[in-house]
């Protein structure tokens, strides 16, 4: 359990971005998420049962990183964690992601 919490904490910015983009939908982000999800749906590492999810009941998720795909695919700073190389890449840099958080008045480090 502690290991899972550490992973969640480490990825908190990307998780927040995915949550934010899931609740406040924008056409451009939904297009990116749709394309990413299409790739994930054809990947053998998709977990539809929830056994590999970081948080139980959040399937479908990625069995490699444990992330809920509805959030992972909407996080523009995230990339696919496939061990042979990402099947899709981040579309934001860390600097752009930090500016996004500043713009929405979110500081995960406080």
Image (tube, rainbow, N blue to C red):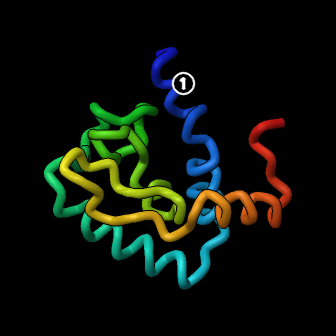
Q: Name above or below for residue 82 compared with residue 97.
A: above
Q: Name above or below for residue 40 compared with residue 3.
A: below
SS under mark 1: helix
Query: Which of the image's four quarters has the C terminus?
Result: top right
State the residue at coordinates (42%, 48%).
68
Residue 92 x %, y %: 56, 67
Task: Quadrant for residue 93, please give it.
Answer: bottom right
Circle 1 is placed at which residue position?
5
Residue 102 x %, y %: 81, 60
Q: Name above or below for residue 31 compared with residue 90.
A: below
State the residue at coordinates (43%, 70%).
33
Residue sitting at the far bottom: 27
Residue 25 x %, y %: 61, 74
State the residue at coordinates (31%, 46%).
62
Report the side of 40 relative to 110 (left or right): left
State the residue at coordinates (46%, 64%).
90
Mark 1: give few (<14), some (14-19) or many (20+) Cα within 10 Å: few
Report the side of 44 relative to 36 (left or right): left
């Amino acid at each position: 359990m502690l290991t899972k919490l550490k992973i969640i904490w480490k990825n908190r910015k990307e998780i927040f971005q995915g949550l934010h983009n899931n609740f406040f939908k924008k056409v451009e982000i939904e297009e990116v998420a749709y394309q990413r999800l299409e790739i994930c749906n054809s990947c053998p590492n998709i977990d539809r049962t929830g056994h590999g999810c970081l948080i139980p009941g959040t399937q479908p998720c990625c069995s490699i990183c444990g992330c809920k795909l509805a959030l992972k695919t909407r996080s523009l700073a995230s990339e696919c964690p496939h061990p042979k190389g990402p099947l899709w890449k981040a579309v934001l840099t860390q600097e752009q992601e930090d500016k996004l958080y500043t713009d929405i008045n979110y500081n995960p480090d406080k």
